[in-house]
Amino acid sequence: MAKINLTDLTFEQLENEIISLKEPSYRAEQIFISVHKKNVRSINDITSVPVSLRDKLNEKFIIPGLVNSKITDSANSVTRKFLFETESPDPGQRNFIESVLISEKGRETVCISTQSGCNVGCGFCATGKMGFKKNLSVSEIILQVYEVKRLSGKEPTNIVYMGMGEPFLNYENMLNSLKILTHPSGFALSSNRITVSTVGFTGKIKKFADDLTAAGNSSVKNVKLALSLHSTDKGFREKIIPTSVKNTLQDIYKEISYFYQKTRNKVTYEYIHFENLNDTDNDIKRIARLLRMIPSNLNVIPFHKIDFELKKPLDVFNNKQDTKNLLSNEKLNDFIDKLKNEKVIVNLRSSSGSDINAACGQLSFNQEKISGTEYKPIS
Ligand code: SF4
């Protein structure tokens, strides 16, 4: 029988396993602390429990790790990108994910992935261009945090689910990873320091609100939600985010409202600035109306060049615009000033890490580069 990944288990799941081994339930807490607070990398290192229990655990469980393949630093030292190898669903294929550590303003923010690749296919996103490889297991999600901490020597203060993949398309594993990262005997990060970002799926935002506020889930109740909005215009949004054809803005706005009413957690809207495409006066008016709906703020993100030819959203407009126009940020300040005039709480997200393809929308890996000399495992 295949062994169970110990790091995948929430506290309650671990407790049930320990009881089934006819051990006292308090052992679950000792093991949970070793795995998630002390980040042991082997069952034999769980020295808080007797050797006899370690032997039993070794028969049924494993603690697999992520293999670190490469760390890349940005020129200004604010951003570090980590490439990790995960288990692959296809034995003939190696499988990789990326995580990012952003050290600024006294914060150590870890941006983690929930999928390898993504099949949503947003036109501005390098991950979307990779296609879908696999959903990450709970342990592959949380081990990114533990490994970034170990390799950087920095204590994470914030976690954002904004790396590769769409968290709401790997919902159960994403939710269980939150429970572990916030559990007092686990990684114990306060839930108001965690943000989950989604392009929005009807039914899922509502379910998220219900789950965060469910009895027994108090450790996750303050997790924040970010909606990758990028446009309030139905037609434009459908062209850059293909899933928004079925998951309409109208329905998503209703669920966002529900999320706030239920959790009272502030919502952030993420908005990549595409010059002349989503920064018109009408866009500004619609954004201002939306942000008056519930307490919320807008993060404006400069568009970041991705390595390969950008087809969408340009092709879809068929207006022969040069890609370079999208890379200019000349109108960005003007856009932000106009939003402020409309009393929108707006922040300009830093482009830190764009030089190492670690900024928003840039996470991807190139299989050829990985199998070549550029990516070498480091210890
Ligand atoms: S922006 Fe997010 S949802 Fe869209 S393709 Fe990229 S990873 Fe997937």
Image: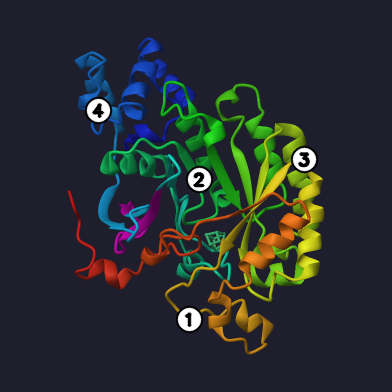
Question: Could you tell me residue 93's position as x and y percent?
Answer: 31, 63
Residue under pointer 1:
309
- Display colour scheme: rainbow
Q: CA distance from mark 3 to mark 4?
A: 43 Å
Closer to viewer: mark 3 or mark 2: 2
Along the horizontal axis of the image, is 331 left or right of 102?
A: right
In the picture shown, does residue 2 fall above or below 290? above
Q: CA distance from mark 4 to mark 2?
A: 29 Å
**Point 57% across, 71% down: residue:** 329
Q: Earlier in the sequence, mark 4 or mark 2?
A: 4
Residue under pointer 2:
160
Front residue of this view, candidates 4 and 114: 114
Q: CA distance from mark 1 to mark 2?
A: 28 Å
Question: Could you tell me residue 169's position as x and y percent?
Answer: 57, 52
Front residue of this view, candidates 6 and 242: 242
**Point 40% across, 18% down: residue:** 20
Residue under pointer 3:
258
Per the image, label 2 sits on a secondary structure element best described as: strand
Secondary structure mainly formed by the magenta segment: strand
Mark sitting on residue 43: 4
The segment highlighted magenta reads 83-102
Front residue of this view, candidates 301 and 196: 301
Q: Does residue 233 show up? A: no
